[in-house]
Amino acid sequence: MKKLFVLFILAVLASCNANKKYSDFDYSFARHGGYAPIYENLWIKGNTAHYSFEGEGKKMKKDFKVSGEELKNIEDALTKNSFRTIREDLKKVYDYRSTSINVKKGPNSGSKSDASFIMENDRPRWNNIVSVFQQIIDSNVDSSK
């Protein structure tokens, strides 16, 4: 009986730790919603990344390592494009595939989303940052699966 109890406790602790990668991150990138909804997420903690995608008849999860150069590219894009000063529009938008970026590390810490669009003057800077995350996904995830 004691062995069964110990196994139960270990299983509960393991399940709690499994969700840690979804909440303990330095950077997160998410795309979700739309008429044909998709759910795409990238979480990065240190050099470890977790990617998930669901939609368009596909479902995939992948863990991979992010290079120091890729991390530098993220920070450079956030800094050069003044991530924290990008302004979100306040209009409500429905059935739109939106992108959210959360940064919990360093001087660029903040959260931005284009769920109600990004102000027109800030869109080029937003797109520059989004493209860096998309490049990491494209170079590390086989999209044919």
Image (spheres, helix red, strand yellow):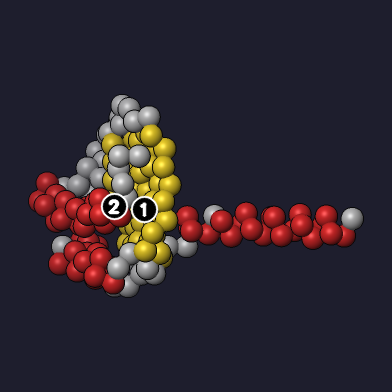
Is residue 20 found left or right of 74 in the rendered image? Answer: right
**In the image as oriented, which residue stretches furthest toward the right?**
1
Q: Which mark is residue 140?
A: none
Q: Position of residue 23 (x, y in %)?
A: 48, 58
Residue 16 vs residue 144, the one in the foreground: 144
Q: Tell me the amino acid under the disc marked 1.
A: Leu
Q: Is residue 74 above or below residue 114?
A: below
Answer with mark 1 or mark 2, whichever residue precedes in sequence: 1
The disc placed on residue 42 is 1
Coordinates of residue 28 in the picture (x, y in percent)? 36, 56
Residue at x-position 76% and y-position 54%: 8
The extreme top residue here reads 35
**106 in relation to 86, above or below:** below
Is 33 above or below relative to 100? Answer: above
Q: Amino acid at mark 2?
A: Ile
Q: Nearer the viewer, residue 88 or 37?
A: 37
Disc 1 and disc 2 in contact, CB within 8 angstroms? yes
Residue 16 in percent (x, y) is at 61, 57
Which residue lies at the image location 39% right of the left edge and 69% below the top edge?
46
Rendered-image quadrant of the C terminus: top left
The residue beneath circle 2 is 137
Task: Name the side, left or right, on which 65 lies relative to 84.
Answer: right
Q: Nearer the viewer, mark 1 or mark 2?
A: 2
Quadrant of res 89 = top left
x then y, percent, for residue 24? 47, 62
Point 21% across, 57% down: residue: 132
Q: Is 53 on the left or on the right of 73, as rendered?
A: right
Crowd rating for badge 1 (residues with CA inside 10 Å; few <14, some 14–19, many 20+): many
Which residue: 22% across, 42% down? Answer: 117
